[in-house]
Image: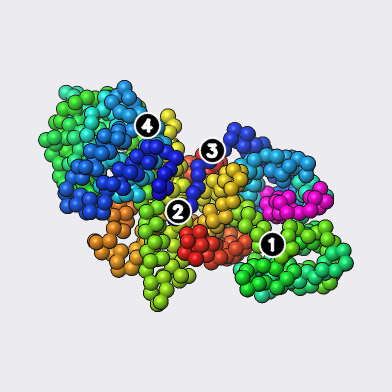
Amino acid sequence: MNDGSDNIIVDTATRIFRDLCEPATINDAEKGVWPKALWDALEESGLPLAWVPDDLGGSGVTMLDGFAVLRVAGRFAAPVPLAETLMAGWLLARAGITVPNGPMTVAPVHADGHIELRADGRLAGRARRVPFARNAGYIAVLVHRGNDAAVALVAAAGLPISQGASLAGEPSDDVSFDGVKPEAVRPVLLDENLLVSFGAAVRLQQMAGALEKILEQSVQHALDRSQFGRPIAKFQAVQHNLATLAGEVAAASAAADAAAEACFRPEIGISEVAIAKVRGGEAAGTGAAIAHQVHGAMGFTYEHSLHHATRRLWAWREEFGNETMWAQRLGRMVAAHGADQLWSFITQGP
Amino acid sequence: MNFSFRFDPIELPPEAKELRQEVRTFLRQEAEAGTFSPGDGKGSFSREFSRRVGAKGWIGMTWPKKYGGHERSQLERYVVTEEMLAARAPTRAHSTADRQSGPVILGYGQEEIRQKILPQIAAGELCFCIGLSEPNSGSDVFAASTRATKTDGGWLVNGRKIWTSGAHHADYMIALLRTSPSTKENRRHGLTQFLVEMKTPGITTRPIINLTGGHDFNEVVFDDAFLPDSHLIGEVDMAWKQATDELAHERSGPDRWIETFPALVELVRRAGEEPSERLAEGIGREVAHLATLRRMSLSVAGMLQAGKTPSVEAAVVKDLGTNFEQALPDKVRLLAPPTGDSEPDTNDDRFEEALRYATLIAPKLTIQGGTREVLRGIIARGLGLR
């Protein structure tokens, strides 16, 4: 997945990130500098609105290509709301709302989130830890009126936003929607569970990309760094750690593929997403720990770029449901099917 | 350099999905007829069962029809294999030949032998074992010293193979034998594969009882055992070249992650319809591992079908898979709701039995067919570290 995939969209994304997403850009973004050149190039390529059909203002790329772009973004630790804008576009398009340009994000991002659409057409409620809320021009909000769900397009300017940061130092903000009048509201067949499942599938692609990156960095470091008179790659203990890391990367990658496939269906496959987020989350933890062990003290510095990927892995595994949340759900689904149906539960996928 | 391994997504074709239902129906009928008890944890040996599987066309599925095969895809074969293993069907009389020995003969055997042996394997008539390990050659396979010496019309074999699973049932062995010394340039040189008929005079099979009290592996002693020239498989001294794709077949299949599965099934039974949070979480985690492993393993089958030789990917699946199946019994043990002195019911007995078996066999899972250490070495080489 380095130079020249057979996919022109992935190649475009790779070129943009390689040119405009340097380690310094990522560090600056953590200090609050908006990476304008990077975002503008992405927007010009049409990638942020990849999941919005032409007639709603997007570029109408397949789901599969959109997920592939997210994996590249994860590899490069892109400090922009590309994933969030893609998700917002997808959510708005599902409700048939014409999608604006510029960075966007979605709310709520937790399965127990609840934002009310009042009878007067205004919203009530707040959403916690919304990624990149402060950078967004618009927020796509899943709202409820009684039992009916709808998507509301909300202009972010002037919203009360309380700023926070994720483990990766990326914006993670609390947003209040009380009394806000949306630009547009349309009904949608969706609930918070499905939105969070979709978010998990999105994060899994980014995690798979970040894990591929830390494997590459760790192998290269082991080959370059000499101790006791030879490259540390020659020590069996180091080799076995890296082999374990490679296995975790492979598992996370397969899990991310499975979750993406589950999103192509008319009804998102929640059990597949659950399986994937549990396995991918575990791989993120195990993988990041090995990468740091191999890098030694150097990898623990701010100067080294390893933390761009590992801190994101620690943040992303927690977002849109962590391993515990998804494992409990999955376990309940399995129990409801019963012991004699466990095997067919596992083979129901491909 | 490409640092990560590919596990391309696989969609099973409709015929494989139909086949799965067919296999499930067959297994249900076999269980009802008393051939085996589904989920008893063990999987065992039954020549009658293997013949009926052969009659169904489910052995040698991917081989050419002229050798008794059925020219079906690797993915269809995969479905049959995983259904048999999940049900703990008694496949041992044919599984080694179907997975490994048959493909070796098909790939490198002499035509006469192919025509004679392969149709019998496909019919479920022949049981095979694999003669690799020796007393002084375990993980270091290419250090084998059991000798095959050229003689008139064939070869004379002397030495010992050990840890040979199923040798006491087997009609044939595929043996790795020393025909020349290794060379300085290539320490893997000098070994040759042979087909060995187990009833050949000069071959003695002795049982080695394992820690479960069961008899699976054996010591096989060769004392001037004569093998005809036709039993030579592939090139003399060049077995190492033949080994690579054999391992891709051996190492990625469902048998590398499903061995302790019955313990999980019984845990789910004991958990009931509304498990505690802790139990639900524990079950969920194991199912997530299992389902992801299955996806990866299926992906390797897809690569085999596409004519690739994914030996590093296969090592990744076996390493992850055997670690998972080995750790599972202990997870199950600690998750299980306590029973104390309450009156046990039949489900408790099933649970205890499955857990006991899984716990006892766990140590071998990361040893047989390539130890964890050997596999990680292969993966490290694939990463460019060696």
Above or below B24: residue B139: below
Q: Which of the 4 image quarters holds residue B55?
A: top right
Residue wearing tag 1: B239
At x 76% / y 61%, what residue is drawn? B194
The single residue placed furthest to the bottom in the displayed view is A228
Q: Gap in Å between the C-alphas at discs 4 and 2?
A: 27 Å
At x 16% / y 48%, what residue is drawn? A33
Q: Gap in Å between the C-alphas at discs 3 and 2?
A: 25 Å
Residue B109 is inside the magenta segment? yes
Measured as percent of width and height from the top left, residue B92 is found at: 71, 54
Measured as percent of width and height from the top left, residue B64 is found at: 73, 42
Q: Which residues are magenta?
A: B89-115
**Disc 3 on helix, strand or loop?**
loop
Q: Are marks 3 and 4 on the same chain?
A: no
Amino acid, disc 1: Ala
Q: Gap in Å between the C-alphas at discs 3 and 4?
A: 22 Å
Amino acid, disc 4: Val
At x 29% / y 24%, what residue is drawn? A56
Residue wearing tag 3: B11
Callouts 1 and 2 close, C-beta under 8 Å: no
Callouts 4 and 2 close, C-beta under 8 Å: no
**Marking on residue A61:** 4
**Disc 4 on helix, strand or loop?**
loop
Amino acid, disc 2: Asn
Q: Nearer the viewer, mark 3 or mark 2?
A: 2
Classify mark 4: residues with Cα within 10 Å, few (<14), some (14-19) or many (20+). Answer: some
Q: Are marks 3 and 2 on the same chain?
A: yes
Q: Is residue B66 left or right of residue B163?
A: right
**Chain of the residue under the numbered disc 3 shown in the image:** B
Residue wearing tag 2: B2
Whether residue B115 is visible: yes
